[in-house]
């Protein structure tokens, strides 16, 4: 899969740059063509000569080099490759990328490319955990940049923690994954529900909840990235439609239920929407006026339970049905009971009490529950939860596939 592919390897500043020499060797062993861009900081750690000798190619360092531009312009450099790999990816280059800065050859190539980009972060543990770095990573992930590592361990600076660059073998596996022409879910159909529902009271008022849709949209993105033909049924959110996903926009639970039913058959359904449990029994056709009356009361009626309906579908039950359990107390206990009551195969339980920041936030801490086993996942970004769930789904449908998410940060 790697043989014959052209990799543009950007080596930025970090002690881990020595591991990039090993990476080049391994790529060359597999007949990949490697062309290196070395940043000024990177050149403090490895020499252009080592990179040139191992890659058997010229090493590019200057943005304003007349010779380099004459031989291969910086735009061509970034487009000529099949994949751009930044290893090590320093905190600095990871800060430049989300902002589109282009003040040296490496950042310019990254901005000019139309190819996939894989980054292997490497930095001090505190730099890694800094909210600025985490926000930059999240932006890059949302834009489809692949991330491998970092790993946990002892650091050159004497500290211990997350920040060590992934090992060359792990980066190689991630490169293989990025270059894989077929996702592991190619040929499968997936349905995802996302966001809140709006249940009208009258023409101007509605009942809703605080769901942002971030988790559901991230799951649809991750499934589509693995090649699944993905249908996203979304309530009203502020989010853009994920690329490569067929999106049905709905307002109410009844519309969401109808759109899901119309999407069947699918192989896997993931219900991440925060569907309103009730709707107003009789929506007023005109705006309800105060009219000098005291407090009004609303008569509610039960909404369809989409997860339950899909799980008990008489003839087109998806072979895998996954639900979420939003709980504020006894999270796992209630989720185990909810999985059985709803009839779904897996349930991801999350604590949505006030103060956890789960509803509307970028992060989630979930318990993954199946009939046979359960796991507690550490708090991570919703994009990472989506990737981890997708890898579980891949492993479910294709048990021979390596179920270890190679593009996920160690947690
Ligand atoms: N769900 C659904 N349709 C509904 C209500 C919920 O599909 N009408 C799905 C959600 O998408 C989620 C799961 O059911 O996957 C559990 O949602 P949750 O709000 O936690 O549970 P409820 O069913 O609403 O139960 P309760 O409010 O009693 O906890």
Image (cartoon, rainbow, N blue to C red):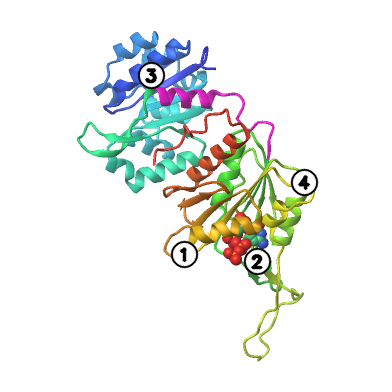
Quadrant of the displayed image that contains ligand 1: bottom right
Residue 23: which numbered mark, if any? 3
Q: Which of label 4 and label 3 is nearer to you?
A: 4
- Of pointers 2 and 4, the one earlier in the residue sequence: 2
Residue 353: which numbered mark, if any? 1
- Kindly state the secondary structure of the residue where label 1 is placed: loop
Question: Could you tell me how far apart the alpha carbons at marks 2 and 1 are, in whole angstroms?
Answer: 18 Å
| Position of residue 329 measured from the top left corner of the image (x, y, whole percent) | 47, 65
| Position of residue 273 measured from the top left corner of the image (x, y, whole percent) | 61, 55
Q: Quadrant of the C terminus?
A: top left
Q: Which residue is mark 4?
A: 316
- Kindly state the secondary structure of the residue where label 2 is placed: loop
In this picture, residue 100 sits left or right of residue 268: left
- Kindly state the secondary structure of the residue where label 4 is placed: loop
- Of pointers 4 and 3, the one earlier in the residue sequence: 3
Q: Which residue is mark 2?
A: 277
Question: Could you tell me how far apart the alpha carbons at marks 4 and 1 are, in whole angstroms?
Answer: 35 Å
Residue found at the very far left of the displayed protein: 158
Against 109, residue 228 (above or below) is below
Say whether marks 2 and 4 touch (CB < 8 Å): no
| Position of residue 27 measured from the top left corner of the image (x, y, whole percent) | 43, 15
Say whether marks 1 and 3 touch (CB < 8 Å): no
Question: Could you tell me how far apart the alpha carbons at marks 2 and 4 are, in whole angstroms?
Answer: 24 Å
Determine if the C-beta at disc 2 is less than 8 A from ligand 1.
yes
In this picture, residue 78 sits left or right of residue 60: right
Question: Could you tell me how far apart the alpha carbons at marks 1 and 3 are, in whole angstroms?
Answer: 45 Å
Q: Residue at x 38, y 44 (%)?
A: 134
Q: Residue at x 69, y 57 (%)?
A: 308
Q: Which of label 3 and label 2 is nearer to you?
A: 2
Question: Could you tell me how far apart the alpha carbons at marks 4 and 3 are, in whole angstroms?
Answer: 47 Å
Q: Which residues are magenta?
A: 169-189
């Amino acid at each position: 899969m790697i043989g014959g592919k052209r990799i543009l390897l950007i080596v930025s500043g970090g002690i881990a740059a020595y591991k990039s020499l090993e990476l080049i060797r391994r790529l060359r062993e597999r007949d990949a063509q490697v062309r290196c861009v070395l940043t000024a900081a990177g050149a403090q750690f490895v020499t252009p000569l080592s990179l040139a000798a191992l890659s058997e190619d010229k090493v590019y360092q200057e943005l304003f080099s007349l010779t380099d531009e004459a031989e291969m312009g910086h735009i061509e450099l970034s487009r000529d490759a099949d994949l751009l790999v930044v290893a090590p990816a320093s905190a600095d280059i990871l800060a430049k990328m989300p902002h589109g800065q282009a003040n040296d050859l490496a950042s310019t190539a990254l901005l000019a490319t139309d190819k996939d980009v894989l980054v292997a972060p490497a930095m001090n543990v505190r730099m890694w955990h800094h909210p600025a770095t985490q926000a930059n990573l999240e932006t890059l992930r949302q834009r489809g940049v692949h991330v491998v590592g970092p790993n946990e361990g002892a650091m050159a600076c004497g500290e211990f923690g997350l920040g060590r660059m992934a090992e060359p073998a792990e980066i190689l596996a991630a490169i293989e994954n990025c270059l894989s022409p077929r996702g592991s879910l190619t040929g499968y159909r997936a349905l995802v529900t996302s966001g809140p529902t709006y249940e009208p009271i009258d023409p101007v008022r509605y009942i809703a909840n605080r769901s942002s849709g971030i988790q559901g949209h991230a799951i649809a993105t991750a499934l589509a990235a693995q090649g699944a033909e993905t249908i996203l049924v979304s309530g009203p959110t502020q989010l853009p439609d994920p690329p490569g996903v067929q999106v049905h926009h709905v307002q109410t639970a009844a519309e969401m239920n109808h759109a899901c039913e119309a999407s069947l058959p699918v192989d896997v359904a993931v219900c991440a929407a925060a569907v309103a449990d009730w709707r107003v029994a009789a929506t007023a056709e005109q705006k309800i006026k105060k009219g000098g009356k005291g407090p009004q009361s609303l008569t509610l009626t039960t909404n369809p339970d989409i997860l339950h309906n899909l799980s008990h579908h008489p003839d087109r039950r998806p072979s895998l049905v996954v639900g979420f359990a939003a709980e504020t107390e006894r999270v796992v206990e209630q989720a185990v009971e909810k999985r059985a009551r709803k009839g779904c195969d897996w349930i991801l339980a999350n604590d949505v009490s006030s103060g956890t920041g789960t509803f509307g936030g970028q992060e989630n801490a979930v318990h993954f529950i199946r009939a046979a086993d359960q796991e507690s996942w550490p708090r991570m970004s919703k994009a990472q939860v989506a990737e981890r769930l997708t890898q579980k789904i891949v492993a479910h449908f294709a048990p021979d596939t390596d179920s270890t998410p190679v593009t996920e940060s160690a947690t």
